[in-house]
Image (cartoon, rainbow, N blue to C red):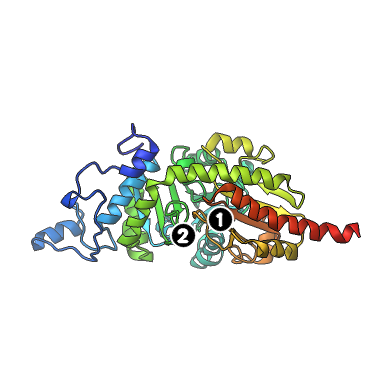
């Protein structure tokens, strides 16, 4: 249920949010409140604020007017009652999970997760008496078997980082609801423009706002959205008292700027990635392409059901070993070798040695992350230029691979 503005389109809400009220001095954009603390008119006012009897701000680890502007705007985009901002995606994920888990509880996590989330669960939370169960969430029978009376949370990404596996959000949320379990979805790859997990039945969404929401590779940030009760509990427990992973007002301002172009950026990311994925699939040096928009994608139907578009992320494997893949990546000129994603710049990386090096080799094998998988974040450059760079590097590889065999 949207808190307001349900009649406005996505881009209108991304630009105006819920803020139709005028800003100080007639400013078009909300001002930056670079203030750690806020004064009380009288002692009694401070007491009322601390007791939650009066709305308002008193300390920026709890709330800040610039962050509130972003949070209200973001809540309307995710069709949530409330949203919360964090210092990073990991700040959002850890704050949310710490809030709803205690020693003795169990959490079910999908097989494939972003490397640091995996590490937080497997190598972090498990040290504090939380049992983490890895389940292939595409296997609903396995999910039902894994649920116990101690299960509190089911956690997943869709598409997953890095191998693009999808999870049926409605199917998993329905099972979770029957057992009073919270479904938490990392919606970083899609953004609320392409996929709205809450509308599909999930309870909480988390984001690395570092990626598409910021969109320009110049900040680190996180967001969460969900019911007003859940967000309040995360604010006063996980965020305020456990992680303290608070976003700065300047970052909130930059994300609001990013949100203004989110719809047109995502549209462009989607069309360019579709073109690149199609051309990659046809190239002789490429063995396999994982992109939800391809007819060959195993979960193409699910993608069409729960995503508005296929996104800007592609995973692929070459007809080459790791050395060949490194050779191809090193030959790129326009496409940058870098982690992160969702930027205007096209980025390529090697998950096994970079973002997913937090997994042991055995864990990667068990979780479906092959050592030769490459991850491409298709940027906003002219698509033919992106392709020309990739084709140049792939052609060199094809010649290098084929030549010895022909000889
Ligand atoms: C990058 C990323 C994160 C972590 O976010 P940070 O902003 O780097 O802390 C979490 N989940 C996914 C899917 C990501 O891509």
Q: CA distance from mark 1 to mark 2?
A: 11 Å
CB at mark 1 closer than 8 A to ligand 1?
no
Taking the view exactly as shown, the residue that stands out farthest to the right is 407
Return the mark for residue 226.
Answer: none
Quadrant where the image shows the N terminus: top left
In this picture, residue 114 sits left or right of residue 193: right
In this picture, residue 220 sits left or right of residue 321: left
Vertical side of 307 occupied by 125: above or below: below
Quadrant where the image shows the C terminus: bottom right
- Local packing at callout 2 (Cα closer than 10 Å; few below 14, some 14-19, many 20+) is some
Compare residues 289 and 97 and report the one nearer the observer.
Answer: 289
Residue found 75% across the figure and 63% down from its top: 324
State whether residue 38 appears in this view. yes
> Which residue position holds label 1?
346
- Secondary structure beneath label 2: loop
Image spot of residue 169 (x, y percent): 53, 41
Residue found 43% across the figure and 46% down from its top: 262
Compare residues 167 and 140 and report the one nearer the observer.
Answer: 167
Vertical side of 17 occupied by 56: above or below: below
Image spot of residue 64 (x, y percent): 26, 58
Image spot of residue 208 (x, y percent): 46, 56
Q: Earlier in the sequence, mark 1 or mark 2?
A: 2
- Local packing at callout 1 (Cα closer than 10 Å; few below 14, some 14-19, many 20+) is many
Compare residues 397 and 352 and report the one nearer the observer.
Answer: 397
Image spot of residue 137 (x, y percent): 60, 46
- Secondary structure beneath label 1: loop
State whether residue 80 appears in this view. no
Q: Quadrant of residue 389?
A: bottom right
Residue found 28% across the figure and 42% down from its top: 18
> Which residue position holds label 2?
217
């Amino acid at each position: 249920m949207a808190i307001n503005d349900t009649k406005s389109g996505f881009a209108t809400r991304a630009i105006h949010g819920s803020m139709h009220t005028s800003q100080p001095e007639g400013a078009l954009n909300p001002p930056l409140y670079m203030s750690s603390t806020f004064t009380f008119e009288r002692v009694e006012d401070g007491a009322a604020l601390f007791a939650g009897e009066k709305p308002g701000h008193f300390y920026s680890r709890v709330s800040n007017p610039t962050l509130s502007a972003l949070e209200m705007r973001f809540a309307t985009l995710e069709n949530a009652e409330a949203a919360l901002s964090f210092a990073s995606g990991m700040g959002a994920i850890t704050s949310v999970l710490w809030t709803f888990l205690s020693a003795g509880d169990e959490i079910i996590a999908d097989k494939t997760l972003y490397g640091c989330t995996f590490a937080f669960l497997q190598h972090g939370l498990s040290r504090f008496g939380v049992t983490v169960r890895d389940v292939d969430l595409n296997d609903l029978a396995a999910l039902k078997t894994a649920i116990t009376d101690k299960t509190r949370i089911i956690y997943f990404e869709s598409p997953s980082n890095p191998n693009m596996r999808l999870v049926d959000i409605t199917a998993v949320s329905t099972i979770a609801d029957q057992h009073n379990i919270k479904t938490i979805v990392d919606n970083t790859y899609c953004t609320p423009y392409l996929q709205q997990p809450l509308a599909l039945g999930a309870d909480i969404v988390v984001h690395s706002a570092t990626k598409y929401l910021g969109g320009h590779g110049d900040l680190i940030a996180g967001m969460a959205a969900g019911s007003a009760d859940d967000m309040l509990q995360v604010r006063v427990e996980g965020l305020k008292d456990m992680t303290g992973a608070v976003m700065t007002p300047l970052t909130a301002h930059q994300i609001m700027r990013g949100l203004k172009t989110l719809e047109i950026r995502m549209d462009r990311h989607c069309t360019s990635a579709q073109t690149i994925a199609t051309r990659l699939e046809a190239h002789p040096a490429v063995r396999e392409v994982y992109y939800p928009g391809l007819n060959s994608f195993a979960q193409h139907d699910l993608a069409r059901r729960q995503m508005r578009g296929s996104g800007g992320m592609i995973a692929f494997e070459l007809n080459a070993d790791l050395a060949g893949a490194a050779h191809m990546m090193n030959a790129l000129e326009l496409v940058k070798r870098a982690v992160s994603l969702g930027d205007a710049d096209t980025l390529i990386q090697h998950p096994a040695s970079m973002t997913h090096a937090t997994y042991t080799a055995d864990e990667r094998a068990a979780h479906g992350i092959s050592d030769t998988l490459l991850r491409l974040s298709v940027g906003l450059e002219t698509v033919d230029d992106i392709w020309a760079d990739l084709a140049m590097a792939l052609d060199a590889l094809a010649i290098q691979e084929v030549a010895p065999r022909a000889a």
